[in-house]
Image (cartoon, rainbow, N blue to C red):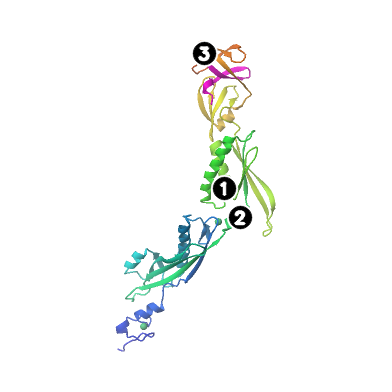
Amino acid sequence: MSERFCYRCGISEREGGPLIEGLCQVCYRKENPVLLIENEINTELCQNCGSYKRRGVWVDPQSYELEELIFEVAENALLEALEDSFSDKIREYEVVPPEELEETEEIPLGRAVVAFEPVGYHIEYFPAIITYEVRVKARTHELQKELHDERKRVTVYVRQTVCPRCQKFLGGYFEAILQVRAEDRPLTEEEREAIGKLVEEKVDEIMRRDRMGFIQDTIEKEEGLDFYMGSTSAARKLAQAIKERFGGKISEAYELVGMDRQTSREVYRTSVSVRIPKFQRGDIVTDRRGTVYEVERVDGKGMTLRNLSTGKSEHKDWKTLGREGVNTVEHEESEAMVTSIGRDEVQLMDMESYETYEIEKPGVELTEGDVYRVVSVKGKRYIRGRKEEEK
Ligand SMILES: [Zn+2]
Ligand SMILES: [Zn+2]
């Protein structure tokens, strides 16, 4: 039998074999490198919001701390570049910490194990430059006595740009207007503040999923608030959140704002309106049967009403309130002192006119000599509460 030799270096099979595809062990590994990654990778991050492209899609970073952010962006670019930089003899690969790779001695055929670590960087200004040492171990042939063990230095350049979302934001773009109003009255200061806070919280939440969910501008109007939003769906979500907190109705309108020159399609802008109920804490209301209540609380589900005849409070949902015809009612307010308490009625003296009058005894405890707030609805008087309880 004749001895075989490596066609590349001439070593005998006895010394350098077994030969693989006519090559000795060393030449086989040299001729069949597994790591084909480029020496340089370019990537970018948005200088306005810190986002960067992951598999072609702009995503928000995990860290906004500049140093961590730059490493996050660079590593992402390196990992993506690794994905298509193995020879076609590698069917799958795994990224592991460098120490783990160091200890790896056996790998199944067609597999690679890769690790990387930064070996030099300057990130004080852009482009930030980070050099990684990438090391890979792999097996591509069953006759291999030793694994492939390759190292390569890869430099990642991180440049600044402005992402498409921020280009739109900085250019004043908006897609929808969210209008927050109250029925039949302007929004109160208290409501404006509460809505502003709610919107702020909710937008943070929305932006985690919808990068266009930004607020371009907030306009304070006499009657309410207008939020100029980057996305219609974000405007809808906000309207829903406001409705859940304050109650009310949501409606939408579309306005033709122009023509897209590229697609020659009409461009519409959506107005999402949320109209919160006119009721406020402290309002005097009646239902269809003429029962008089004070509004104690207004929320997304309905209102808590205190019956001024019985003194009892009850929460009713919006549907029930609508069905019972609950509405604000004209009334006069006065103050009166309880002068005597009978079995079924109470005598009071008006604090301004000193007129005395009697009313049906309400379901609340009264004290002779104390001054109470009285409301008069359609000529009938009700005790609303003790004077010093006034808020
Ligand atoms: Zn050889
Ligand atoms: Zn951006």
Q: Find the distance from the CA under tag 3 to the CA under tag 1.
A: 57 Å
Instruction: Identify the residue position indicated by label 3 in the image.
Output: 369
Q: Which of the two discs, 1 and 2, labels the residue nearer the N terminus?
A: 2
Q: Residue at x 36, y 65 (%)?
A: 98
- Is residue 20 shown to the viewer in this render? no
The picture quadrant where one finds residue 338 is top right
The spot of residue 146 in percent (x, y) is: 33, 75
Q: Which residues are magenta?
A: 367-391
Residue 345 left/right relative to 332: left
What's the residue type where badge 1 is placed?
Ala
* Magenta run includes residue 390: yes
Task: Say above or below: 135 vs 28.
Answer: above
* Magenta run includes residue 370: yes
Q: Residue at x 61, y 15 (%)?
A: 352
What's the residue type where badge 3 is placed?
Gly
Q: Pick the residue in front: 333 or 91.
A: 333
